[in-house]
Image (cartoon, grey):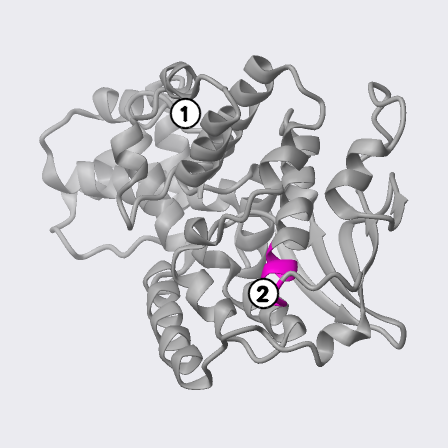
Amino acid sequence: MVDVRLQIAQSRGIDTEAVLQRVGLNAEDLKQPDARITIAQDWAVWQELVNIAQDPTLGLKLGCTPMLSGLGPMSYVILNAETIADAMQMFARYQRLLADVGRVTVVETPESVDYVVTCEDWDWCEAERYIVDHWMAITKTVTMALAGNQTHPFLLAVHFQYDYPPDLPDLSLYRESFGDVVFKFGCPDTRCIFSRETLTIPVVGANPELKALFEHQAQTIIARYTEDQLSDRVRQRIALAIQGELPTMQEIATQLTLSPRSLQRKLQAEDTSFQTLLDEVRRDLAIEFLREQNLNKTEIAYLLVFSDLSTFSRRFKTWTGYSPSGFQKCRQGDIAPQG
């Protein structure tokens, strides 16, 4: 996705090599089929594009160029959906193929079919407005392409979560992107509102057998991302990061391509929290270090980021019921950590 977006930006005269240099990414790495970058890196790319272009409608302009090739396996699924509404549902179902941030849902009402993007994870992203514009413009561009670029306007309205941009004198550029539709700003979420015709408008060239094949492929890829619970992955990241300094939730979230809010919410769904996992990792590492006896207790206290040995000793006794010295006197394996 990032690679295709940069190609479109380059075709519009933006120095994308400078963008990549400023955010520390390599153009060749972006071309790897299984490559995934952090959300922070993706948003840094957006911010640099905005800084270089100095164009308040950059997101709209980049989104008006079809980029199905940038959707990877997702593109094959939606290209073979039965109807436009079905394609939207497929996108919502397999959105994790693209990113672990934001949430797409398709809501059917008596009057419309709404493609809704919830952006609660984006509140710390400076380029939020451009990303929202981009996704809404892509939604309109792709749905029109799937329908064979019908001239009949089945897009009725576009709602934006952000407030009306003060640097725009009018909505002319929005109308160029979306047509003569209703625009609303400062809404609870961001959505494209389509007529109920999308329930019956066929996707041009769709093949049901191919859709089933590509859906299976999409499900296989998603399974690779969800084999382990998120809490297990967070524990692993924390254990690797503790070296005389405690990692922050922001740092671990970035490594997992999540925002801190999204990470917190997902951990709550697993009945845990970042602080709980941090404590558990420190406890388990303390037990491991004491059993191996390669480090003295002062060194262990330092590595696990305790202010002094006495603080470490008190915490260890809270965890296990034993002091560090008492624990080391027991035979290895005789003591199980207390949860």
Magenta residues (range) = 142-148
* Number of dots carrying numbers: 2
| Image quadrant occupied by the N terminus | top left
Among numbered discs 1 and 2, the one appearing first in the sequence: 2
Residue extending farthest bottom: 209
Residue 146 is tagged as 2
- Tell me what residue is drawn at x 59 percent, y 17 percent: 53
Left or right? Give the position of 187 relative to 239: right
| Image quadrant occupied by the C terminus | bottom left
**Of 316 and 195, the residue lying toward us:** 195
Q: Amino acid at mark 2?
A: Leu
Relative to 112, is 37 above or below?
A: above
- Tell me what residue is drawn at x 54 percent, y 27 percent: 46
Left or right? Give the position of 339 relative to 191: left
**Main SS of residues in magenta:** helix
Real-space Cα separation, disc 1 to disc 2, in angstroms? 63 Å
How far across and down, in percent of the image, does residue 51 sit?
58, 14
Q: Amino acid at mark 1?
A: Thr
Q: Is residue 143 magenta?
A: yes
Left or right? Give the position of 62 relative to 6: right
